[in-house]
Amino acid sequence: MTDLNIDGTIVSGAVAEIIICMAAAEVEGIASVGSYGAGSVVKGLFSGSKEDTGIEFETGADGGLSIGVHVEAFFGYALPDIAGKIRTSVAGAVESQLGAKVDRVDVYVDGIKFAE
């Protein structure tokens, strides 16, 4: 993952991934972000695991971030509502914690999980 240069502060891509993963995982109805279960996002990222984080981002010409988040949702939740909440949560976390402008957050619902 590429490091981010935000107004002269270099932020590791892994740090940005953690912030984005945590923001997406806290949305009600999310079963997992990438290959991580919602409860194990931080543990997986800090362990150096090679699992897919499900996070993509790139910096646009204007300096704003375009972010992609891959998730699995629990059955029974309205997917457009979940996607909207993920967009709001991720954009808010990135803007407040990294100080980066967010141009867009694309949400990819890659699967549905059934409650156990």
Image (cartoon, rainbow, N blue to C red):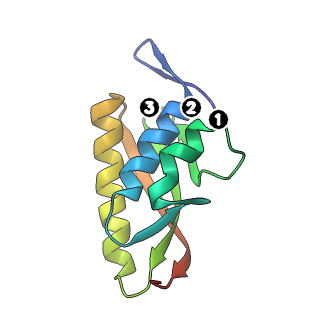
**Residue sitting nearer the eye, 52 or 70:** 52
Residue name at image x 31 percent, y 36 percent: 95
Q: Give yes or no for contact between labels 3 and 2 (Cβ–Cβ under 8 Å).
A: no
Above or below for 83 versus 35: below
Instruction: Please give the residue where the numbered disc 3 appears in the rendered image.
Output: 62
Q: CA distance from mark 2 to mark 1?
A: 5 Å
* Residue most extreme to the top: 8
User: Which amino acid type is shown beneath numbered disc 3?
Assistant: Asp
**Residue 9's image quarter?**
top left
Q: Is residue 62 left or right of residue 56?
A: left
Residue name at image x 30 percent, y 63 percent: 85
Front of the two marks 3 and 2: 2
> Which of the labelled discs sits on residue 1, or is there none?
1
Residue name at image x 44 percent, y 11 percent: 8
Above or below for 97 versus 115: above
* Residue most extreme to the front: 116
Determine whether the residue tagged by mark 2 lies in a helix, strand or loop. helix
Determine whether the residue tagged by mark 3 lies in a helix, strand or loop. loop
Determine whether the residue tagged by mark 1 lies in a helix, strand or loop. loop
Q: Residue 91: percent from the left, percent from the top? A: 33, 46
Above or below for 91 versus 26: above
> Which of the labelled discs sits on residue 113, or is there none?
none
Give whichever of discs 2 and 1 has the lower sequence position. 1
Residue name at image x 49 percent, y 31 percent: 15
User: Which amino acid type is shown beneath numbered disc 2?
Assistant: Gly
**Residue sitting nearer the eye, 100 or 64:** 100
Give whichever of discs 3 and 2 has the lower sequence position. 2
> Which of the labelled discs sits on residue 13, or is there none?
2
Above or below for 13 versus 111: above
Q: Is residue 108 left or right of residue 63?
A: right
User: Which amino acid type is shown beneath numbered disc 1?
Assistant: Met
Give whichever of discs 1 and 3 has the lower sequence position. 1
